[in-house]
Amino acid sequence: MYDGWRSKHDVDLEWVNKTNDFMEATFGDAPAYVQLKCPCARCDNRRAANKEKMGLHLFNNGWTQNYHVWTYHGEVQRVREEV
């Protein structure tokens, strides 16, 4: 998902599909006014956006680097168990 965006004019289909899957998993059927931290490279999970605005941000700016565990979007970071 992070590799398929080179610029807003150069995006591959796999990136689009995975980004759409992320948006659906994150927002689901939430009302349009719901805002969550935007993971685009410009907002870097610091500013909130609704689903429409976040989609535009991701398309225009790409993903923030190294955001592989979606801690701001419902995924929990696993704690490593002691061996």
Image: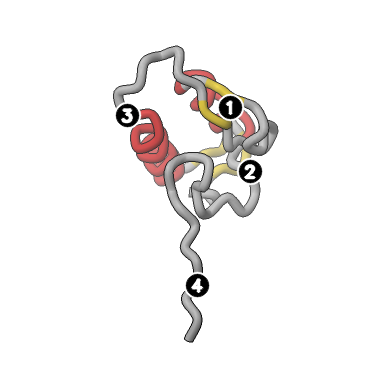
Instruction: Name the image quarter holding residue 46.
Output: top right
Task: Judge the density around disc 2: few (<14), some (14-19), many (≥20) Cα neighbours within 10 Å.
Answer: some
Looking at the image, tell me whether mark 1 or mark 2 is earlier in sequence order.
1
Residue type at mark 2: give it.
Thr
**Residue behind mark 1:** 57
Residue type at mark 1: give it.
His
Task: Judge the density around disc 3: few (<14), some (14-19), many (≥20) Cα neighbours within 10 Å.
Answer: few
Vertical side of 78 occupied by 19: above or below: above
**Residue behind mark 2:** 64
Q: Nearer the viewer, residue 16 or 82?
A: 82
Residue type at mark 3: give it.
Gly
Closer to the observer: label 3 or label 2? 3
Extreme-top residue of the structure: 33
Looking at the image, tell me whether mark 3 or mark 2 is earlier in sequence order.
3
Q: Describe residue 8's horizontal placement relative to residue 82 as left or right.
A: right
Residue type at mark 4: give it.
Arg
Looking at the image, tell me whether mark 1 or mark 4 is earlier in sequence order.
1
Q: Assign a secondary structure to mark 4.
A: loop
Q: Position of residue 60 (x, y in %)?
A: 60, 28
Looking at the image, tell me whether mark 4 or mark 2 is earlier in sequence order.
2
Extreme-left residue of the structure: 29
Q: Disc 3 to disc 2, how far (Cα)?
A: 22 Å
Instruction: Name the image quarter holding residue 49.
Output: top right
**Residue behind mark 4:** 80
